[in-house]
Image (cartoon, rainbow, N blue to C red):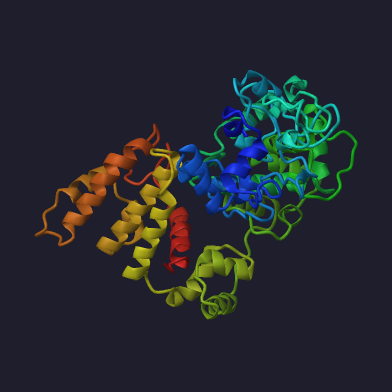
């Protein structure tokens, strides 16, 4: 829209000239499902490369906010539009009136399509998800339709139904149990795309692990049993969430911005001082682990504390259960791991792995390593230089290349320090036949990747997370299994 108006033409005229009359843009969510042809054509018309355009799509959050993006269905944290022809039945586009008012050229931010973004991290006001005058969804491109003489190119912030200027919408202060909950939410919104996050003493190198746990909690709080936790918050702070209304059962992303905001700050308040405050709230509310987990497989940082503090702990599977589970995985051609066996037998206890140690899949072949490296190259291509996600993928590629060259295990590589890397890079070919290749990989990694990953807590570890310390062997093992399981080039 901004490109069309900058060229002094209406949006519909621009899309017809650029993509042809047969192009279907507004009867689908192009923020989620823009085709390669559309992106390539737009790249030719605007001068922006395809990679930059992809960075503006919601699918760019894959691996950061969610593990997999569904371009044609529901995805966690993405607000649905409820498309019907060229209309929107749901409130999937939010806006901050102060941002639109201050913009030299008003535009709607990509992050305003995210369900957990309920306040403006710049102005600290509650977002709107509809026109405050007529309650219509925001459909900015419909201002072009059916208007000839009275149309203005500056009408992108007007309500398509009643003409109210969204820049003039009131700016409300957000409510919360305490100030720290608002600070936490603003931090989450401001830094949601850095690729990692933390909870208590746990640091998650893959950010979607934190967001998966948070999503389960906000969904639980909207249930009948979750209401007990909201009552506990009111007893402790005097802040009342949701008033006296009973919520109908629906996805978190389909709720209004005010309801989503109150569920989010309630969840963040419960997660403060994790896990002590949450456990106290659950015990006070009479909630057991089975009620909270609801039979779902959740991130380890969340599920482990719930099981250990609110239930009977982790059940230990029998040898026969583990043997049958590993046999089932082998027959299905799936990767056999502690987590995979644990999911089948209902436990993640380490003893589940002892009974299938001889049935582990063979180490990755040279061809499989090459496919994993090519897959990482594809993910890296198009990312901004020195962006957190690009640096993390470059680190992963260096580890995989070293595993392929040396034949060493991931455990051995992850235990290396910067001093060890310097020694390896300086060894002669007479000492190790692969010395030259190893030196090239290590020196490139130290020069182009680690120096930008490092933070105050990085220490002397060679392979580190973004602004953190060394990578956990368990987290890297999960990452390697994903690369191993998708080895078809």
Which quadrant is home to the C terminus? Answer: bottom left
Residue 396 x/y as whole percent: 38, 52
Q: Quadrant of residue 410?
A: bottom left
| 84 left or right of 461 in image | right
Name the residue rendered at 48%, 58% in the picture.
478
Write the residue at 77% across / 25% down: 150
Residue 362 shows up from this direction? yes
| 4 to 30, vertically: above or below | above
> How many marks can you see?
0
Occupied quadrant, residue 116:
top right
Query: Relative to the observer, which residue lies in front, 305 or 130?
Result: 130
Seen at 56% across and 69% down, the residue is 341
Front-most of 434 and 321?
434
| 443 left or right of 273 in image | left
Quick one: which residue is furthest to the front in this view? 149
Nearest the viewer among 457 and 369 is 369
Q: Position of residue 67 (x, y in %)?
A: 57, 53
- Of the 4 image quadrants, the one containing the N terminus is top right
Residue 9 position, x and y percent, is 62, 32
Residue 203 appearing in the image: no
Residue 468 at x, y percent in the picture = 43, 39
Depicted 170 relative to depicted 41: above or below: above
- In this rendering, the answer to whether 340 lies above or below 80 is below
């Amino acid at each position: 829209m901004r490109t069309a108006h900058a060229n002094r033409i209406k949006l519909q005229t621009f899309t017809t000239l650029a993509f042809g009359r047969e192009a279907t843009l507004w009867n689908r969510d192009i923020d989620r499902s823009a085709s390669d042809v559309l992106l390539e054509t737009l790249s030719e018309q605007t001068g922006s490369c395809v990679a930059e355009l992809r960075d503006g799509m919601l699918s760019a959050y894959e691996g950061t906010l969610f593990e997999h993006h569904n371009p044609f269905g529901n995805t966690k944290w993405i607000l649905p539009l409820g498309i019907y022809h060229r209309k929107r039945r749901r409130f999937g586009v939010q806006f901050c009136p102060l941002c639109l008012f201050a913009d030299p050229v008003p535009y709607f931010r990509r992050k305003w399509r995210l369900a957990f973004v309920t306040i403006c991290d710049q102005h600290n006001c509650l977002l709107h998800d509809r026109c405050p005058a007529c309650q219509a969804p925001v459909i900015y491109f419909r201002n072009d339709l059916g208007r000839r003489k009275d149309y203005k190119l500056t009408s992108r912030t007007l309500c398509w139904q009643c003409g109210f200027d969204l820049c003039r919408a009131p700016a409300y202060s957000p409510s919360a149990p305490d100030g720290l909950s608002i600070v936490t939410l603003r931090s989450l919104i401001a830094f949601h795309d850095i690729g990692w996050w933390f909870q208590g003493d746990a640091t998650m190198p893959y950010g979607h692990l934190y967001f998966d746990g948070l999503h389960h909690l906000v969904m639980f709080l909207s249930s009948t049993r979750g209401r007990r936790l909201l009552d506990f918050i009111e007893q402790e702070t005097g802040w009342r969430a949701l008033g006296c209304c009973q919520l109908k059962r629906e996805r978190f992303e389909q709720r209004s911005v005010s309801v989503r905001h109150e569920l989010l700050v309630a969840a963040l308040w419960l997660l403060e001082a994790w896990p002590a405050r949450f456990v106290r709230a659950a015990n006070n509310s009479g909630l057991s682990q089975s009620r909270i987990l609801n039979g779902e497989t959740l991130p380890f940082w969340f599920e482990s504390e719930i099981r250990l503090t609110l239930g009977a702990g982790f059940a230990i599977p029998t040898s026969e259960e583990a043997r049958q589970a590993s046999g089932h995985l082998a027959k299905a051609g799936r990767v056999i791991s502690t987590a995979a066996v644990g999911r089948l037998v209902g436990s993640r206890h380490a003893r589940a792995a002892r009974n299938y140690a001889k049935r582990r899949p063979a180490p990755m072949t040279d061809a499989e390593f090459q496919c994993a490296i090519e897959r990482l190259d594809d993910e890296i291509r198009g990312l901004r230089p020195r962006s957190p996600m690009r640096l993390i993928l470059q680190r992963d590629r260096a580890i995989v290349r070293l595993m392929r060259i040396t034949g060493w295990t991931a455990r051995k590589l992850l235990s290396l320090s910067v001093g060890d890397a310097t020694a390896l890079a300086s060894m002669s070919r007479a000492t190790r036949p692969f010395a030259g290749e190893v030196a090239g990989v290590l020196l490139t990694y130290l020069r182009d990747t680690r120096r930008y990953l490092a933070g105050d807590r990085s220490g002397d570890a060679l392979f580190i997370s973004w602004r953190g310390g060394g990578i956990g062997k368990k987290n890297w093992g999960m990452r390697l299994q994903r690369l191993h399981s998708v080895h078809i080039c």
